[in-house]
Amino acid sequence: MKLIENISQLATCAGEGGQGAMHAIGDAAMVWEGATIRWVGPKRELPVEYWNAERIDAQGGTVVPGLVDCHTHLAFGGWRADEFTRRIEGASYLDIARAGGGIAKTVRLTREAGADALLNRARGFVREMTTLGVTTIEAKSGYGLDREHELELLRVYRRLAQAEPIAVVATFLGAHVVPPEYRDRREAYVALLIDELIPAVAAERLATACDVFVEESAFSLDEARRILLAGRAAGLAPRLHADQLSAGGGAELAAEVGALSADHLEHVSEKGIAAMAQAGVVAVSLPLVSLYLGQPPLPARRLIAAGVPVAVATDFNPGTAPSYHLPLAMTLACTLQRMTPAEALKGGTYYAAKALGLERRVGSLERGKAADFAVIDAPDVEHWLYHLRPNACRLTVAGGRAIWRAPGHSGARELA
Ligand code: NIG
Ligand code: FE
């Protein structure tokens, strides 16, 4: 049994109460046993049965649930720094894609990379993410775009999940774009996804969700519907990249197929917002993309007012968001999307877990849930996301065990 105390603020991020309800407790304590939380509350109410638990000192910091990055494209070959410069010089994301850059370039480099190289690189990313307080990461395929390489990416994620002490949850994104070799026979590619790849992914249990990029340059609404329904029938929960570059009815489709989430939504329509609210679809905001592409973010205030939960994720990928700094994304959710720090935290924890269908296990600090949490060197959540530092996380605990300790954090020694 372990007890963490000397906590200036603990935000449980329990689901009830809506976006701004992070359920803060001052001078808090939390008890866990093995991988599971036993008790959370004000320290003065600590039940006597826990008084002898092994004590860990939070050094007056803030405790939050382990962060959940619910949208990443974690494994890929190469980078695209040249496109970063070209966009600054005036080229658009679509100009670059039409000239053979963009996703197609990363597909070429990913196919060449080999599973071990992809794994080693992704492992390095994951380790750095855990130093920021992240304990659950969603990871999409989508840079293989043929049978061999899509399955290779998903098997890399499986190996990563087995080797690392955090949760890695894979999503099948074979429908990222139509690969160049199918450019003039896109129907054959859709058929390959539906008839071969989705069954193969499901048979090997390589993913829990199926995602489609719905966009003029990617997949139409009709194609997406067929792919998502085939995935759903095979046990893969639908998710969508929707309404990113133009309003395309993606949010409405997400509601129609009962998707866990619709992500991006920079151009979501009022009808789409209403449909998502009605169907209980989570909106995943990706403010690092707004930062990198210099484009307006999704209308978070309108979504929240309509009752749609808004998650915050990085969208880490080599094109539109080459960063996996989730606390930075949360600060950007505040400044660009006008979400309060409490709302942004709920978006990077409970609602992110909900976008993965994992909210019963992770994303909040409550009795019976996973002992996944981060100790932040700040007096409270507001101060943490306001005073943005390279890394304010002092200690990351996943499954009850310390997986990252900032040098000099004495309270962490007991968890070694
Ligand atoms: O989420 N929108 C499509 N996919 C990625 C971008 C991928 C890339 O440019 O490599 C995204 O933004
Ligand atoms: Fe994405």
Image (spheres, helix red, strand yellow):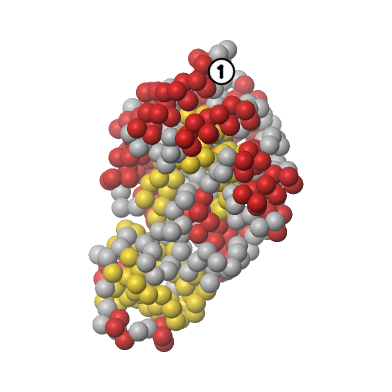
Q: Secondary structure at mark 1?
A: helix
> Which residue sits at x=30%, y=81%?
50
- Is residue 233 rendered to the left or right of residue 281? left
Quadrant assignment, res 75: top left
Does residue 408 appear in the picture of this structure?
no
The percent position of residue 304, horizontal first and vertical second, equals 67, 57
Please state which of residues 154 and 83 is positioned toward the viewer in this rendering: 154
Quadrant assignment, res 413: bottom left
- Is residue 118 rendered to the left or right of residue 187? left
Please state which of residues 193 and 75 is positioned toward the viewer in this rendering: 193
Up/down of 40 relative to 249, above or below: below
Quadrant assignment, res 21: bottom right
Q: Which residue is mark 1?
A: 186
Does residue 383 appear in the picture of this structure?
yes
The percent position of residue 46, horizontal first and vertical second, equals 37, 83
Kind of residue sitting beneath label 1:
Arg
- Is residue 149 rendered to the left or right of residue 183? left
Please state which of residues 245 and 228 is positioned toward the viewer in this rendering: 228
